[in-house]
Image (cartoon, coloured by chain):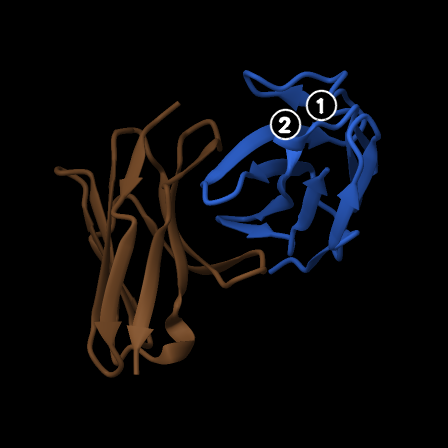
Amino acid sequence: SAVISQKPSRDICQRGTSLTIQCQVDSQVTMMFWYRQQPGQSLTLIATANQGSEATYESGFVIDKFPISRPNLTFSTLTVSNMSPEDSSIYLCSVGAGYEQYFGPGTRLTVT
Amino acid sequence: GEDVEQSLFLSVREGDSSVINCTYTDSSSTYLYWYKQEPGAGLQLLTYIFSNMDMKQDQRLTVLLNKKDKHLSLRIADTQTGDSAIYFCAEKDTGNQFYFGTGTSLTVIP
């Protein structure tokens, strides 16, 4: 299994500002994933982050809005830039370990 | 993307069995998963099943897969109040892409 931690666990931010979310894994993993869960909704994949290469973004998500860093095999950050109330969501980091896929506890973001 | 659908709500009495259903459209699914999300928490992996299996049992949990009908179910025996949560099914395709269902909110009535 993999143990994933995220910081911050929650934040309230003002419109127009940016927030960087950190994800730390207790083991080395090749691929890390960032998901968004809007209120009352299911999970949507934002991007896949491989160490040493640019992140791959899903349709509807762009690097300027959600820049991602992946400096090593245990750590990644997701920045939510120029926030608006529509960005209020839970952001989850995820890693695969064999057949299993694990998720962090999530960062609950509220934009006012 | 692929469609993964679940009913939104389920209520059961404590001690009864719960059955949560899921349908999917991707015939190339490799693995199918069940996750539990308690209020304010992340997703907890409950169990998963390989697409060439039709059943998997793990303590109180039984997963049934009907690949022909693309139907997955999760049965929780002797449901407890601590089982109240949202349950997501998810399927992984051959490209390792995950698709999540809409989630089923299970309420256990004491």
Indicate which disc residue A47 carries: 2
Residue B33 appears in view = no
Q: Considering only vertical position in the picture, is B78 above or below B73?
A: below
SS class, disc 1: loop
Q: In which quarter of the image is the C terminus of chain A?
A: top right
Crowd rating for badge 1 (residues with CA inside 10 Å; few <14, some 14–19, many 20+)? many
* Depth order, front residue of B86/A34: B86
Q: Do the residues labelled 1 and 2 touch (CB within 8 Å)?
A: yes
The location of residue A66, given as percent across then percent down, is 73, 25
Q: Which label's residue is closer to the chain start, 1 or 2? A: 2
Q: Quadrant of residue A85?
A: top right
Are there few (<14), some (14-19), or many (20+) residues within 10 Å of tag 2?
Answer: many
Q: Chain B is drawn in which colour?
A: brown
Q: Position of residue A31 (x, y in %)?
A: 66, 36
- Classify residue B47 by image quadrant: bottom left
Q: In this view, does B33 lie to the left or right of B13?
A: right
Q: Is residue B24 left or right of residue A51?
A: left
Rendered shade, chain A: blue
Of helix, strand and loop, which one carries label 2? Answer: strand
| Visible residue check, residue A91 | yes
Foreground residue among A106 and A41: A41
Decide which of A29, B75 is in the foreground and name it: B75
At horizontal 33% and vertical 34% (from top left) the residue drawn is B29
Label 1 sits on residue: A55
